[in-house]
Image (spheres, rainbow, N blue to C red):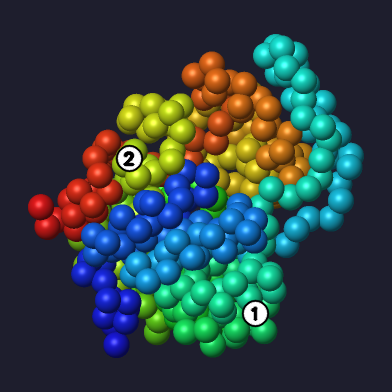
């Protein structure tokens, strides 16, 4: 059975789960229109996750996405240096820094989240930064969920196939948001979406989904012609009214000439976003920034203060390299346009 038939999809387009820029509304709009909606769970508490799973129940297939990172060990010296670097910005903005905290702002998939998956049985569960330990992965598969995970290299794709995922999302360098790499953190080892797609399609027996820079009907067609069973699209949906994208982020997305870079400034892990002040003055990449996800908390007050003044200076403006097709239209209209059916 093909990937689309198994999920009952009319269109070969998955909406990328985008933590911080959407909730169930966008996911359900995409699913209702014939694609596969995506729900990001990496920043949700267990209580919020349960409410989201209740909300999407019986509404058609939705992909519930989790992070699979290891929480880092304590690193008080790096956190202290990071807070010291941010102090001049707090002084400039006339605000106090947040109280010191080393509490993670993103939670990895664990037994508690797995129990909610087993209870609410979403149609699709996907993972970023690898897959959970074998016992948890087997429990997810036993729940009946189709399991997807992201690969940024051929090596990662082969590793995922060996671990038993049902389909592989290949993420090229053009993709916005966090890089899904987990075996090799050397960005020089990663490649463009279409190049990686061709390598993986030739080397694995699983369905392959292309992601990264796919934001118009031509890119969708090219990926399918190269052997992808479907594509995953994120950036092109960020300006839809169903998304919760913040105002400063929306404005930046609608300036197609603004450059993007890969940065670790906002969370401690490489992710692609539109260049802003924080990236220019603190990065874009700095090996001394606290490990993912510890860096984020100390930027919270700066981000909130700047956004209250309509400034994007300290906000993660996640976006892929192709923003030419970001449109302020309903998600259904954008999806049908991408699928070239309107």
Image: 68 above or below 270: below
Q: Quadrant of the N terminus?
A: bottom left
| Residue 280 spot, x, y in % from top left | 58, 25
Quick one: which residue is furthest to the right in this view? 77
Q: Is residue 304 left or right of residue 82?
A: left
User: Badge 2 local density, few (<14 within 10 Å), some, or many (20+)?
Assistant: some
Distance, label 1 to label 2, CA atoms, is 36 Å
Residue displayed at 46% across by 73% down: 122
Front-most of 309 and 263? 309
Image: 188 above or below 156: above
What residue did someone put label 2 on? 241
| Residue 40 spot, x, y in % from top left | 51, 56
Residue displayed at 45% across by 61% down: 55
What residue did someone put label 1 on? 136
Q: Do we see residue 338 in this rendering?
A: no
Of the numbered discs 1 and 2, the one sitting upstream in the chain is 1
Helix, strand or loop at disc 2? Answer: loop
| Residue 118 spot, x, y in % from top left | 57, 79
Quarter location, residue 250: top left
């Amino acid at each position: 059975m093909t990937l689309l038939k198994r999920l009952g999809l009319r269109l070969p387009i998955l909406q990328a789960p985008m933590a911080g820029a959407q909730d169930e509304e966008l996911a359900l709009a995409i699913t209702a229109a014939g694609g596969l909606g995506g729900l990001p769970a990496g920043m949700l508490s267990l209580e919020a996750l349960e409410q989201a799973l209740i909300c999407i129940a019986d509404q058609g297939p939705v992909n519930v996405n989790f992070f699979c990172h290891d929480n880092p060990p304590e690193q008080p010296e790096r956190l202290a240096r990071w807070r010291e670097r941010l102090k001049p910005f707090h002084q400039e903005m006339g605000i106090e820094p947040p109280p010191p905290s080393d509490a993670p702002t993103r939670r990895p998939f664990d037994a508690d989240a797995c129990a909610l998956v087993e209870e609410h049985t979403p149609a699709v569960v996907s993972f970023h930064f690898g897959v959970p330990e074998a016992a948890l992965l087997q429990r997810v598969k036993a729940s009946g969920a189709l399991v997807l995970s992201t690969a940024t290299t051929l090596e990662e794709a082969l590793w995922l196939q060996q671990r038993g995922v049902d389909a592989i999302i290949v993420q090229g360098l053009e993709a916005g948001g966090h890089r899904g790499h987990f075996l090799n953190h050397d960005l020089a080892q990663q490649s463009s979406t279409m190049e990686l797609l061709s390598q993986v399609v030739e080397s694995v027996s699983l369905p392959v989904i292309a992601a990264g820079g796919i934001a118009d009907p031509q890119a969708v067609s090219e990926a399918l012609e190269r052997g992808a069973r479907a594509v995953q699209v994120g950036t092109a949906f960020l300006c839809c009214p169903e998304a919760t994208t913040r105002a400063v982020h929306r404005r930046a997305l609608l300036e197609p000439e603004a450059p993007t870079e890969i940065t670790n400034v906002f969370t401690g892990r490489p992710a692609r976003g539109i260049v802003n002040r924080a990236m220019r003055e603190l990065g874009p990449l700095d090996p001394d920034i606290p490990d993912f996800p510890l860096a984020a908390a100390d930027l919270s007050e700066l981000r909130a203060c700047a956004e209250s003044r309509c400034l994007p200076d300290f906000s993660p403006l996640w976006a892929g390299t192709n923003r030419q097709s970001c449109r302020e239209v309903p998600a259904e209209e954008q999806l049908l346009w991408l699928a070239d059916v309107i």
